[in-house]
């Protein structure tokens, strides 16, 4: 038996202790981390406080940008409502840009005609009123009752002192500045709304495709079908509401023209615009026109009141159901409740958006929630 080699008795070299330490220092250069602070009351309170501050900041941002959000929502709503007309022109082999130009040009033409019909009569009435003010003042000064009150309480003297002191000028100047600011803000908002509507109308197909791509692929087809039906319902609602308003305006214009009513076209346009407001819009237009007619004569006022009373019954029970039966499928009670909630939250804009939103929610409940509940 051969003698063991001296090399065989030598133990294998051990790894240098500096190598794992170097690796450990490289992995954790600042030492081993301590216990997590997830259960620390201080950290829990700090996280909760930061969450509350973040929620408050987001709420304040939404409140500050409320007007912008409303403009974006209304522009998107109008774009979806005008899209069926664009697609109808596209089906006649017209490019989408040309179809959008025609539809949008029609919208702008309506606003121009509305302004031309409303502004001149209002300007003439204001000018005639300003010209008649001196006569009204003379009649007022000649009134015996006013003379008696002036001798007892010096009303005219106080009015004259107020005018000469500059208080009236400051009040009128402040009122003019405020009115100018309101007019400028309305013009800017209207222009912004038109630009946003044009942008959304032009990019609506790409926006739809992008939003549907955010849905998981397994549910994308069904979501696309539901989304297209919701958008078709909104477009049908807008188109139907516009058609009902046009019918109301044309019928009112024909009736007022037969009665030889002054400013018949302007009053008919007011009826058409107010008829867009759900529930109360037709009544508001009818009351305004009837009051204007009463200022002309009692006969015209009574005739207008009877006409609108009959026409609203025809619109509510004949025209509206026939036009809207293919666009929105919402129960009458749900329609009223949705319009009331929308009006309370966002005013006229909320009332306009409430009915198609209620129809969309009803569709989702009918096609998604109820079938799932029946399988449980």
Image: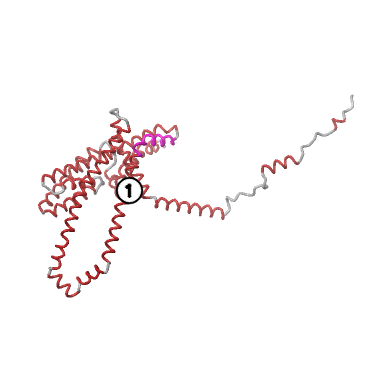
**Mark 1 — residue?**
189
Q: Residue at x 15, y 59 (%)?
A: 132
Coloration mode = secondary structure
Crowd class of label 1 (few under 14; some 14 to 19; many from 20; radius 10 Å): some
Name the image quarter holding the N terminus. top right
Q: Nearer the viewer, residue 268 or 24?
A: 268
x and y percent of residue 85 in the render? Answer: 28, 35
Q: Is residue 140 above or below residue 69?
A: below
> Where is residue 216 shown, x and y percent of the image?
45, 34
Query: For residue 67: magenta?
Result: no
Q: Classify the position of the C terminus by image quarter.
A: top left
Question: Does residue 312 appear left or right of residue 338 in this picture?
Answer: left
Magenta stretch, overall SS:
helix
Read off the magenta span. Answer: 199-215
The reply, left or right, for residue 262 in relation to residue 53 is: left
Mark 1, secondary structure of its residue: helix
Q: Quadrant of residue 201?
A: top left
Residue for point 14% across, 73% down? 148
Taking 365 as reference, is 62 above or below it?
below
Q: Nearer the viewer, residue 311 or 39?
A: 311
> Quadrant of the rendered structure where residue 108 is?
top left
The residue nearer to you, when weighing 138 against 36, is: 138
Residue at 32% from the left image edge and 48% from the top image edge = 189
Which image quadrant for residue 28? top right
**Residue 118 x, y percent position in the rendering:** 21, 48
Q: Tell me residue 352's x, y (percent).
A: 29, 45
Q: Is residue 46 left or right of residue 242?
A: right
Front-lying residue, 235 or 76: 76
Q: Tell whether 303 sits left or right of 278.
A: left
């Amino acid at each position: 038996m051969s003698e063991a080699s001296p090399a065989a008795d030598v133990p294998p070299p051990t790894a240098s202790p500096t190598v794992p330490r170097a690796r450990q220092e490289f992995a954790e250069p600042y030492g081993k981390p301590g216990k997590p602070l997830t259960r620390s009351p201080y950290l829990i309170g700090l996280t909760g406080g930061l969450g509350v501050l973040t929620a408050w900041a987001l709420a304040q941002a939404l409140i500050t940008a409320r007007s912008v959000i409303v403009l974006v929502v209304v522009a998107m709503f109008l774009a979806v409502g005008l899209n069926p007309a664009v697609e109808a022109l596209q089906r006649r082999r017209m490019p989408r840009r040309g179809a959008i130009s025609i539809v949008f040009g029609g919208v702008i033409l309506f606003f121009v005609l509305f302004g031309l019909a409303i502004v001149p009569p209002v300007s003439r009435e204001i000018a005639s009123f300003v010209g008649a003010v001196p006569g009204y003042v003379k009649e007022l000064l000649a009134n015996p009752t006013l003379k008696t009150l002036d001798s007892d309480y010096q009303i005219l003297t106080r009015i004259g002192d107020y005018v000469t002191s500059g208080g009236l000028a400051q009040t009128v100047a402040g009122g003019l500045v405020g009115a100018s600011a309101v007019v400028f803000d309305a013009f800017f908002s209207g222009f912004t709304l038109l630009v946003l509507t044009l942008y959304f109308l032009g990019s609506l197909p790409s926006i739809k495709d992008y939003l549907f791509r955010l849905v998981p692929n397994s549910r994308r087809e069904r979501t696309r079908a539901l989304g297209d039906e919701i958008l078709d319902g909104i477009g049908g609602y807008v188109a139907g509401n516009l058609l009902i308003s046009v019918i109301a305006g044309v019928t009112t214009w024909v009736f007022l023209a037969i009665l030889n009513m002054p400013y018949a076209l302007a009053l008919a346009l007011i009826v058409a615009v107010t008829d867009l407001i759900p529930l109360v819009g037709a009544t508001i237009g009818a009351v305004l026109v009837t009051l204007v007619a009463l200022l002309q004569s009692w006969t015209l006022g009574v005739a207008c009141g009877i006409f609108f009373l009959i026409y609203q019954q025809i619109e509510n029970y004949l025209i509206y159901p026939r036009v809207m039966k293919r666009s929105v499928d919402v129960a009458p009670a749900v329609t009223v409740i949705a319009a009331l909630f929308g009006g309370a939250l966002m005013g006229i804009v909320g009332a306009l958006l409430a009915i198609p939103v209620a129809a969309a929610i009803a569709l989702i409940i009918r096609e998604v929630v109820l079938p799932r509940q029946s399988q449980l």
